[in-house]
Image: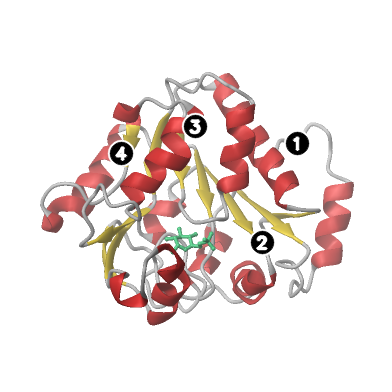
């Protein structure tokens, strides 16, 4: 079962997430981080930036990218990762990877190869979409899927329209690490904040493992930490148990 930690607010989640990264980098200075876009991971990046760690040897792999946007468009995940992760954290841009470069037909396999060559992801930061997607793996995605082109749902396009001038400008296609790719990471750190994520989060953490809720694939992973605020945790049936377990967490146990 995932370790679910119900935090007071996004700031506390950010501090805990940054602590997990700092602990990893302390014993593995060339660690491989899996980074996510969206609003959810921002508190972790902010807290990490404030710690001024030397992350110059760390590599990072993004989960996904739109297809059809110029890579330097402000909404492209290439731009978002550069702006919100690479620059503030002081990562070496040569070690930061975002899928979708080169010929599209080969981009998925090329990304899988790059991930393998880097030794795999040590810590994967994840958000969750309101329809239960992780990365851009929409409902129906194979639980064993690898990096590939996908079609976004209308719900995801609407959710992400806030970053564009209009819904029409939101791309229809994307490239995303698969659920099987994500499962290969050694530690998954899933964050969710706010009422709007409560149903998706409960389905992912406590519902049946199903391609209907791609986030439920985390239940197949041996090491998952879920950081949620009260509102996102409001539909969790075992919330009391998670609070109890965290209050009694052995001091020798890492996050
Ligand atoms: C986006 C991203 C996901 C992200 C999710 C939630 O579409 N592809 O990686 O986790 O949707 O976004 P937010 O954190 O802004 O709610």
Judge whether 154 appears above or below 27 on screen.
below
Residue identified by numbered label 4: 116
User: How busy is the neighbourhood of tag 4: few (under 14 within 10 Å), some, or many (20 plus)?
Assistant: few
Q: Which mark is residue 253?
A: 1
How far is mark 4 from mark 1, CA to CA? 28 Å
User: How busy is the neighbourhood of tag 2: few (under 14 within 10 Å), some, or many (20 plus)?
Assistant: many
N-terminal-most mark, 2 or 3: 3
Q: Residue 193 carries which label?
A: 2
Q: Can residue 90 be seen in this view?
A: yes
Residue identified by numbered label 3: 88
How far is mark 2 from mark 1, CA to CA? 25 Å
Percent x, y of residue 39: 54, 55
Judge whether 87 appears above or below 167 on screen.
above
N-terminal-most mark, 3 or 4: 3
Query: Depth check: 88 or 152 in front?
Result: 88
Lateral position of residue 162 relative to residue 172, left or right: right
Lateral position of residue 107 relative to residue 11, left or right: left
Q: Is mark 4 on a helix, strand or loop?
A: helix
Q: Can residue 202 be seen in this view?
A: no
Q: What element carries label 1?
A: loop
């Amino acid at each position: 079962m995932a370790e679910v930690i119900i935090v007071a607010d996004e700031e506390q989640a950010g501090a805990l997430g940054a602590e997990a990264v700092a602990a990893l980098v302390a014993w593995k200075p060339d660690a491989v981080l899996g980074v996510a876009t969206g609003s959810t991971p921002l508190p972790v990046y902010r807290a990490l930036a404030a710690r001024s760690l030397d992350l110059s040897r760390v590599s990072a792999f993004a989960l996904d990218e739109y297809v059809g946007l110029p890579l330097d468009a402000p909404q492209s995940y290439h731009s978002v990762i550069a702006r919100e992760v690479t620059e503030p954290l002081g990562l070496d841009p040569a070690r930061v990877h975002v899928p979708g470069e080169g010929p599209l037909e080969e981009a998925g396999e090329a990304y899988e190869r790059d991930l393998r060559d880097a030794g795999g992801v040590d810590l994967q930061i994840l958000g969750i979409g309101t329809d239960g997607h992780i990365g851009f793996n929409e409902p129906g995605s194979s639980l064993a899927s690898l990096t590939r082109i996908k079609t976004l749902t209308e719900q995801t396009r609407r959710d992400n329209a806030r970053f564009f001038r209009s819904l029409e400008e939101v791309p229809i296609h994307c490239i995303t690490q698969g659920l099987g790719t994500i499962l290969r990471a050694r530690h998954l750190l899933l964050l969710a904040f706010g009422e709007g994520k409560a149903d998706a989060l409960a389905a992912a953490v406590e519902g049946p493992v199903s391609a209907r809720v791609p986030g439920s694939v985390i239940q197949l992973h041996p090491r998952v930490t879920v950081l949620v605020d009260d509102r996102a945790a409001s539909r969790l049936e075992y919330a009391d148990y998670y609070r109890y377990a965290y209050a009694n967490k052995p001091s020798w146990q890492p996050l």
